Amino acid sequence: MSRSPHSRPAPSSGTAPRGTGHVRIIGGRWRGTKLAVPDRPGLRPSSDRVRETLFNWLMPALPGARVLDLFAGTGVLGLEALSRGAAQAVLVERDPGLASALREAVAKLSAPAEVHAADALAWLRGRHDTFDLVFLDPPFADGLWAGALDGLAPRLAPGARVYVESPGDIQPVVPPNWVLHREGRTREVRYALYRAPGHHATVTLRADDPPATTE
């Protein structure tokens, strides 16, 4: 869940901001549940079509997975994963108001999720647990992909999946031992799913598999 290019988070009071729109969980036990999109400049939830494609890719990996939504925003990626069978999620969001809204959503759903109001990179440095699935969709204007990818390395379980979203003209450099599973593009974003090294990790994108496209 990133903010669009050239936008910065507005100052926050730490209370849950009033939503001016909503994004909908599109699959699983909470299908159809609306999450508020708070009034924050440039807050841009991943589109329904991108999420539908992404979670089709992730379907075999979701049951029982421990999930990290590192730049959570509305939390729709992490909560969608829980809705579809993930066991637990950690949602990290530095804006205190957005974090408060996340806590309200987690409480409403009785979701097995932790919410941390923290800077993502500092939070990674203080953790010692690992995750099976990570959503990495940082604020586009802040250029945080390199720092986040470096910080993630010790936090990944063997064979973990990492989803990376970026502007369409930017392809973040991932560790050389990661395997590209699938990728796609819209007019605005590139979205890609990678596999970290693991005991049974294999190349899953054949040369004749076309990339996904979403208009």
Image (cartoon, grey):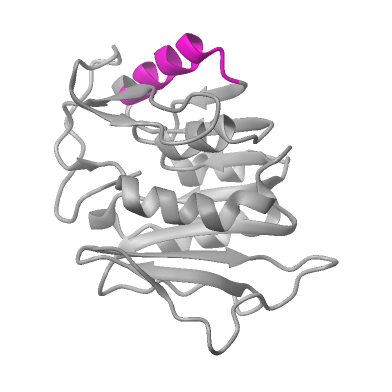
* Residue 46 visible somewhere in the drawing: no
Q: Is residue 29 left or right of residue 117?
A: right
Point 33% across, 24% down: residue: 35
Residue projecting furthest to the bottom: 207
Q: Quadrant of residue 43?
A: top left
Query: Quadrant of residue 50 in the image?
Result: bottom left
Which of 143 and 193 lies nearest the eye of the viewer?
Answer: 193
Is residue 10 shown left or right of residue 58? left
Residue 143 percent coordinates (x, y): 32, 60
Q: Residue at position x 49%, y 10% from top?
A: 107
Magenta stretch holds residue 106: yes
User: Quadrant of the image for the N terminus?
Assistant: top left
Is residue 164 covered in magenta?
Answer: no
In x, y percent, where is residue 27? Answer: 48, 35
The vertical placement of 60 against 109, above or below, is below
Q: In the rendered image, is residue 40 in sight?
A: yes
From what the image shows, is residue 203 above or below residue 92?
Answer: below
Residue in the picture at 63% in, 73% down? 178
Q: Magenta residues?
A: 98-111
Residue occupying the point 62% across, 57% down: 161
**Magenta residues, dominant SS class:** helix
Q: Is residue 81 above or below residue 183?
A: above
Total numbered badges shown on the rendered structure: 0
Q: Is residue 190 above or below residue 135?
A: below
